[in-house]
Image (cartoon, grey):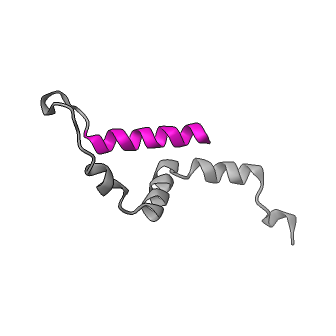
Amino acid sequence: MKRENWNTREKRREAERNTNQLAELLKILNHFFPDLRIQLLNVKDPRKKNYTTYETDVILLERILAYMDRLY
């Protein structure tokens, strides 16, 4: 195999820069947990509707992603 066909660090870094990592993560989540959003929507919200800005599913998904980031 010729050396010019190998992936260099520069090529890998360029590929990482061109990849939308959030979109890739959401693809993985949808693949392995296709009903995750439906399950998050079914969580009962004890907060008063007048004082809420974000829906429960948005907050829970954000916390899941934050936890996953801490693991990595």
Residue at 21% x, 35% y is: 46
**Start and end of the magenta stretch?**
55-72
Residue 44: image quadrant is top left
| Residue found at the very far bottom of the displayed protein | 1
Question: Quick check: 13 above or below 7?
Answer: above
Position of residue 66 measured from the top left corner of the image (x, y, whole percent): 48, 37
Of residues 8 and 48, which is closer to you in this image?
A: 48
Does residue 24 lie above or below 50 as drawn?
Answer: below
Q: Residue furthest top?
A: 51
| Residue 12 lies within the magenta run | no
Magenta segment, prevailing SS (helix, strand or loop): helix
Q: Is residue 43 left or right of residue 65?
A: left
Observer-nearest of 26 and 38 = 38
32 relative to 63, above or below: below
Residue at 82% across, 63% down = 4
Q: Is residue 46 left or right of residue 37?
A: left
Q: Quadrant of residue 8?
A: bottom right
If the image is split into quadrants, where does the N terminus sit? bottom right
- Please state the horizontal and vertical placement of residue 30, each as a whole percent of the image: 42, 60
Residue 13 horizontal/vertical position (percent): 68, 48
Residue visible at 14% across and 33% down? 49
Residue 60 at x, y = what percent?
36, 41
